[in-house]
Image (tube, rainbow, N blue to C red):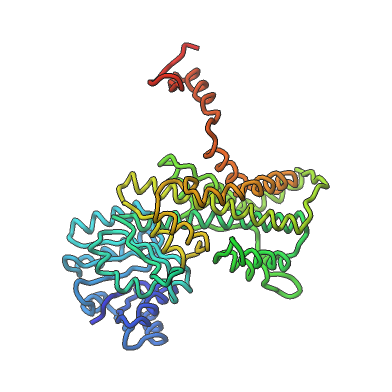
């Protein structure tokens, strides 16, 4: 009998199955297209990885209570798999969705299956194809009972944190796991956008080629910006094609699969400031209008003042600016997670979230170890943590300098500039919202609060 089963043998599903089998757990696999299953088993099968042609045989091969992983396209395909499984499962069996699903859909599935005495787990998985095979970061949500059923297997296949612990932990009830993965992806959007803006400044203002920028980013990866994204940026920028660099032949239209947009929309619904991450989504949207941008560029000339910062100095200032913006992107994401945890009573442990992001996931970075340790001692906004507040404050002057310089050179900086605006807003004792409230009361009698007395007030203007 197999300890666990998996449905969906695309690249990710196949690699997860191989990972589980390599850790000594026997796994049954099934795919809607039998030929695909046979090809996988032929290439990777063995004592610990076995395939089945029918769902009935697949289910019968599993130890009880059964644990079935689903790795198919999000949305209707997942619902179809669940519907086909339900008549074959028994009380206390567990279904796990490993895909990128919206957490509210996960919660609906959770409620539906719990009503049938079955358990549903929405588990975020980060790390891409390599992570799935060699060790991802995993974010399971559902019941603790379900987590207990999965814990041994998931801990054995997960990536390792900085201290060698497994990069997986129970996140919280219902859709908590998929929510945290969604925010992970939002932070990822923000960090990649600020990196891209640094790349554009070096390329368009200083005329550096991709190879030269690759060397700078590799150097950044040796310091406080050390992270997976900076690690691979050196490889992406340094990749040659003929006499040039591959990145220069890639069309400047960034795609997206929706998780960044979901994060931004959820933040708006909950009233959490997420400007850097949201602008990163808009930046991708704007990039998609390539033909329009080309036409508009012909009729809208931009001034280019001669002022420049000496390159060596600029590279140092840019490093601090990118670091500040990266911290701010994390601050926004963590604030959203904390708010959602409080509102939905998930009791999410931010220290554990930081720890399981130390390895395997796309946003893994040195700073996560600092966040892990900090959130073990306290909770609250990232800017409230003394050690992190000090680092942000030290790096902000560089972010301000780079933003001003970049704007003077007509370089769009939606990520860097909104990170700075977010910092300035969140650390200002007073904002001009009192003026907005006056206007709202004038035209709509929306009322306002006062600084000198309690209650709601309206003025006959």
Which of the two residues, 94 or 170, is positioned nearer the viewer here? 170
Residue 48 against residue 95 in the figure, above or below = below
The reply, left or right, for residue 143 in relation to residue 289 is: left
The reply, left or right, for residue 4 in relation to residue 410 is: left
The reply, left or right, for residue 185 in relation to residue 38 is: right
Residue 338 against residue 171 in the figure, above or below = above
Residue 10 image position (x, y, % from top left): 42, 73
Seen at 41% across and 41% down, the residue is 269
Residue 397 against residue 170 in the figure, above or below = above
When asked about the image quadrant of residue 172, the answer is bottom left
When asked about the image quadrant of residue 134, the answer is bottom left
Residue 329 image position (x, y, % from top left): 53, 51
Is residue 78 visible from the viewing direction of this image? no
Which of the two residues, 391 or 4, is positioned nearer the viewer here? 391
Q: Residue furthest top?
A: 460
Residue 43 image position (x, y, % from top left): 42, 86
Seen at 49% across and 19% down, the residue is 443
Is residue 256 visible from the viewing direction of this image? yes
Which of the two residues, 116 or 168, is positioned nearer the viewer here? 168
Residue 104 image position (x, y, % from top left): 34, 51
Seen at 67% across and 52% down, the residue is 291
Seen at 52% across and 63% down, the residue is 365
The reply, left or right, for residue 408 in relation to residue 53 is: right
Residue 2 against residue 280 in the figure, above or below = below
Quadrant in the picture for the N terminus: bottom left
- The image shows a total of numbered marks equal to 0
């Amino acid at each position: 009998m197999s300890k666990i089963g998996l449905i969906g043998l695309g690249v990710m599903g196949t690699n997860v199955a191989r990972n589980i089998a390599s850790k000594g757990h026997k796994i049954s696999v099934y795919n809607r297209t039998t030929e695909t299953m046979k090809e996988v088993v032929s290439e990777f099968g063995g004592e610990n990885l076995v395939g089945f042609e029918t769902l009935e045989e697949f289910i019968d091969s599993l130890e009880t209570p059964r644990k079935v992983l689903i790795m198919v396209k999000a949305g209707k395909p997942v619902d179809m798999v669940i519907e086909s499984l339900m008549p074959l499962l028994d009380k206390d069996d567990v279904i796990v969705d490993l895909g990128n699903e919206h957490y509210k859909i996960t919660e609906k599935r959770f409620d539906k299956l719990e009503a049938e005495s079955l358990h549903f787990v929405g588990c975020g998985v980060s790390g891409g194809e390599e992570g799935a095979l060699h060790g991802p970061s995993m974010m399971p949500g559902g019941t603790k009972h379900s987590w207990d059923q999965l814990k041994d297997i998931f801990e054995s296949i997960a990536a390792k944190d900085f201290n060698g612990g497994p990069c997986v932990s129970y996140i919280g009830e219902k859709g908590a796991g998929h929510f945290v993965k969604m925010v992970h992806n939002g932070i990822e959007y923000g960090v990649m956008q600020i990196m891209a803006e640094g790349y554009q400044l070096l390329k368009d203002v200083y005329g550096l080629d991709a190879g030269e920028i690759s060397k700078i980013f590799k150097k950044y990866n040796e310091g406080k910006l050390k992270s997976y994204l900076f690690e691979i940026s050196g490889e992406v920028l340094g990749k040659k094609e003929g006499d040039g660099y591959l990145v220069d032949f890639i069309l400047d239209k960034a795609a997206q699969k929706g998780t960044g947009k979901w994060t931004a929309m959820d933040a708006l619904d909950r009233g959490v400031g997420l400007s850097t991450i949201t602008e990163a989504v808009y930046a991708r949207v704007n990039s998609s209008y390539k033909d329009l941008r080309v036409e508009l560029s012909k009729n809208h000339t931009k001034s280019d003042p001669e002022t420049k910062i000496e390159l060596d100095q600029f590279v140092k200032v840019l490093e601090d600016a990118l670091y500040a913006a990266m911290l701010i992107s994390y601050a926004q994401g963590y604030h959203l997670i904390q708010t959602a945890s409080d509102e939905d009573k998930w009791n999410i442990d931010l220290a554990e979230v930081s720890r399981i992001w130390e390895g395997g996931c796309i946003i893994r970075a040195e700073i996560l170890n600092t966040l892990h340790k900090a959130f073990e001692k306290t909770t609250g906004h990232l800017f409230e943590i003394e050690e992190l507040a000090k680092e942000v404050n030290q790096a902000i002057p560089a972010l301000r300098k780079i933003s001003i310089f970049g704007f003077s050179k007509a370089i769009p900086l939606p990520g860097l500039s909104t990170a700075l605006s977010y910092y300035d807003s969140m650390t200002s004792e007073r904002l001009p919202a009192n003026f907005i409230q006056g206007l709202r009361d004038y035209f709509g009698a929306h009322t306002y609060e006062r600084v000198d007395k309690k209650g709601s007030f309206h003025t006959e203007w």
